[in-house]
Every structure is written in C-alpha cells, then in structure tokens.
Amino acid sequence: MPAAPQESHPDSLTLATHGEVRHDWSLEEIEALFALPFNDLLFRAQQVHRAHFEANAVQVSTLLSIKTGACPEDCKYCPQSGHYNTGLGKEKLLEIEKVVEQARAAREAGASRFCMGAAWKSPRERDLEVVLEMVRRVKELGLETCMTLGMVDTDQASRLAEAGLDYYNHNLDTSPDYYGEIITTRTYADRLETLGNVREAGMKVCSGGILGMGEAPRDRAALLQQLVKLEPHPESVPINMLVKVPGTPLENVEDLDPLEYVRAIAVARILMPQSHVRLSAGREQMSDSTQALAFLAGANSIFYGDTLLTTGNPQVEKDRALFDRLGLHPERRETCTDEVGQQAALAAALEASAVRQAAAAQETAASRLAYDAAQA
C-alpha cells in the first residue's frame, strides 16, 4: 500500500489561500520559498494569484524611449550608459507630437498603459516642462501613464503627479549587498529616496530588478525582500532577465537558468499578492514554454512591441499567437465594457500596429521630430 502523500514544506511556510499582505518577510523565509520543490512553489503562487486577479488576464503596456543614450550613470547592464561603447548613438528628446502619435498607436493596439523612458540621471528643468506636457497629452487619450526619468526630488515628483502621471518606474536592480558590483554612480539609498518621493506625491510605484547579472541566489531573495519592505508594495513589479549587450561589462556573464527566473516570478507573486508582476526585459530570449511557466507562476503584465527601450522585445504578432495558445487575454480597461469587442479590436489593431512599426523603422528624419535635450 503506497504511503500517504506528505507536504514537502515546513508548517512555518503555510500560506493562506487569500495571500496575506506582509512587509516583514525575513530573508530566511524568502529563501525557504525559493527552495521549495518547483511544483509546490508554482501551486502556492497560483493560489495566491487567483485570489487577487483574474487568472487569465494580462495587463499590457507599451514602452517608448523618449530620450536615448549618453546617460551619465555606469550601470554595467545598460547599453545607454555613456561609459561603454555599445554602438548606441545619442538621441534627442522626442517632440511631444511624436510621443502622442506613438501613444495613440499603442492604445489602438490594445495597450492600457503607456510608459516613457529617458536616459537621465535626473531630469533638468527645461526637460521636465516638456515631459509634463507629454503626460498631459497621453492622459487625454485615456491611457494610464508611466515614466522612468532617473532620480526625482519631492518637487519634481509633485509636479509629475499634478500633470496626471499614474506610475513612476525606478528599479532597485539587485540586492543592497550586490548593488556596488553593478552601479557606482548612484547609491541604493538614492533609489529608495526617489521611490519615497514618488509615493509621497501620490503616484503608484513601479519597481523591480534584473536577474542574471552574476548575483547569488541570496541576492535575488534580498532584492525581493527590499521590495516587500516598501509600504504599500509596488503596484507594478517588473522582473527583468538580463539582456547581454556587447560592449557592456556584463556581456559575457553566465546565463541564468530559466527555471530560476520562473522561481523568482513565483516568489514575487507570493510576497506581493496584490501587485502586477511583469515579464519585462529579456522576454525576447525566452521560449514560449518559459513564458507559459512564468504566467502560471503569477506573472500578469507584459510590455509588447518591437523594442523595449533599446533592446529587443517579442513582436506583437508573436505575442498575440502566444496569448491565443495559452488562452490569455488583455486585462480589461475601465474604458472598455465589451470584452469580446476588445479582443477582436486587439487582434485587428495588432496587425495594423505591426505594419506601422515596420514603416516607422524606415524613418530617417528623427532629428526633425526632436529638440536637443542633451546640450547644456
């Protein structure tokens, strides 16, 4: 007679199905979650996910680089850093109309949030005025807005909030202990201060990290612990897989096991049950099977489009096909009451978006659509 099945985890890790919201997870508890058998971990994460979200809905965002290259930071993973020769040229801050055009296309293709990123250590005054108008114009389209502009002080955060910015992205990147191996031009405390300024201004927080930068497993647990300590938890948690760009110091780092990435998604879901956990950079390198496991582990947000700032991202047609195969659909927007109509519109709009993006790739007159925000 076969032995009765036994739980393969200690009672101290027993989680309520509804997913208790905590900010006091110890590093040992988080490491114990990472150490669970893979099936047990995903089962727990799926329980928590279904208690807080529609199981097969995925929030869809589009990310546009509004100012590329020549960043003074020395982040070892980033092709936009002015410290490394990656072949990425310095570009100017896009004109407002160009940004609005891209936001409108994203909305037509089914995106509910439009994210804008600029390669700055922090925005200067004349740049901020333009950025504020971008926020106002994109908000008029009925989209949620998100920006990543580097460090912001209390005044800058307040002005962004007053303009209608919904989310501010500022990643912690890795654990406090490993951080100095990746970045020296900005401290961990600087990053936490920016997140505090954003929260104080009333905006929602988008903050996560990058896996596969040569960090130890304990560093991944410590990164998630730092995010969990934030009160409230970040509403959006991007879990990036390193994209190894030639010319950066991390171009030859050892690849992270995809299953370890999925484990991190699952642990993030358990630790932050009410947050959207996003598959972000590195998704282009992931197989469909890895992405499917990540969705099973509790990921419920993606960026789509051909580029993610300056690195590749799965094309919209491929994303649509994967959604169809997995039975996933875009998370419902408040402005859309007909889910069947939304999905039909998404299918048609994705095709149109792919044509527009191919045409846009042939444009060579970017300088006429920009002003030089890189000059002092």
Image (cartoon, helix red, strand yellow):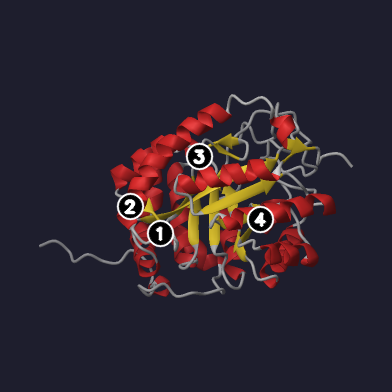
Left or right position of 191 against 345: right
Label 3 sits on residue? 305
Task: Specify which label sits upstream in the sequence, 1 or 2.
Answer: 1
Disc 1 vs disc 3: which is toward the camera?
1
- How far apart marks 1 and 3 lie (CA) works out to 21 Å
- How far apart marks 2 and 3 lie (CA) works out to 21 Å
Task: Specify which label sits upstream in the sequence, 4 or 3.
Answer: 4
- How far apart marks 4 and 3 lie (CA) works out to 20 Å
Q: Give SS at disc 1.
A: loop
Label 4 sits on residue? 135
Disc 3 residue type (three-letter): Gly
Disc 2 vs disc 3: which is toward the camera?
2
Image height of 237 relative to 22, above or below:
above
Disc 1 residue type (three-letter): Cys
Query: Residue at 49% across / 74% down in the picture?
Result: 21
Identify the image quadrant of residue 196.
bottom right
Image quadrant containing the N terminus: bottom left
Disc 4 residue type (three-letter): Val
Image height of 181 relative to 243, above or below:
below
Q: Position of residue 92 (x, y in %)?
A: 75, 37
Q: Give SS at disc 2.
A: helix
Front one among 51 and 264: 51
Identify the image quadrant of residue 190.
bottom right
